[in-house]
Image (cartoon, rainbow, N blue to C red):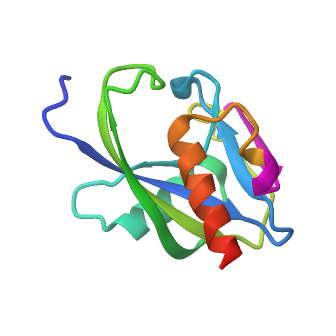
């Protein structure tokens, strides 16, 4: 079906008790590392969508701490098909590091210190979100 409007999506930069962040690989992003997330459904607020999407994709319960940034992806060549997304990326925490991949959207994952994560093969939107988190740590 052809897209008629931009799609609001949520992403979770999840930090575990060791100060590591969760990055996941998705075929939709040409196997680059990204953060878990997905679409907000009609009638669903963004934080509720975020908690639901994280649970569905990686099996983790998270506590939403702060909106880190928002970005637009307008027909980005980094995504597998032309779409217009508005990303709302949140800083979240979890007490559980046991990832349960959904097997469809997520094909691999890594827990990594954010300073090292920025050096991995990540999509540009995730790179910016990690940068915002690193700025937050300096304050």
Q: Is residue 52 above or below residue 111?
A: below
Q: Which residues are magenta?
A: 107-116
With 86 as the anchor, is 125 left or right in this view? Answer: right
Above or below, comparing residue 80 to residue 17 in the picture: above
Q: Quadrant of residue 2?
A: top left
Horizontal and vertical percent for residue 123?
57, 34
Q: Is residue 55 in sight in this rendering?
A: no
User: Viewed as shown, does residue 19 lie left or right of 123?
Assistant: right
Give the residue furthest to the left.
4
Q: Quadrant of residue 133?
A: bottom right
Vertical arrangement, residue 7 with respect to residue 123, above or below = below
**In-front residue for pair 42/66:** 66
Between 127 and 36, the residue placed more toward the observer is 127
Number of marks in the image? 0
**x and y percent of residue 122 in the render?**
64, 35
Residue 108: say if magenta: yes
The residue drawn where x is 19% and y is 29% is 3
In the rendered image, the quadrant that contains the C terminus is bottom right
Q: Residue at x 29, y 64 (%)?
A: 44
Q: Nearer the viewer, residue 136 or 1?
A: 136
Q: Quadrant of the N terminus?
A: top left
């Amino acid at each position: 079906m052809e897209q008629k409007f931009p799609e609001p999506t949520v992403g979770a930069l999840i930090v575990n008790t060791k100060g590591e962040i969760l990055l996941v690989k998705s075929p939709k992003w040409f196997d680059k590392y990204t953060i878990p997330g997905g679409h907000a459904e009609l009638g669903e607020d963004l934080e509720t969508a975020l908690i639901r999407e994280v649970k569905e994709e990686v099996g983790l319960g998270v506590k939403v701490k702060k909106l880190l940034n928002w970005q637009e992806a307008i027909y980005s060549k980094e995504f597998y098909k032309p779409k217009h997304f508005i990303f709302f990326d949140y800083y979240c925490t979890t007490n559980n590091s046991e990832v349960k991949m959904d097997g469809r959207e997520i094909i691999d994952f890594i827990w990594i210190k954010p300073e090292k994560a920025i050096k991995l093969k990540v999509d540009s939107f995730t790179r910016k979100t990690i940068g915002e988190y690193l700025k937050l740590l300096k304050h």
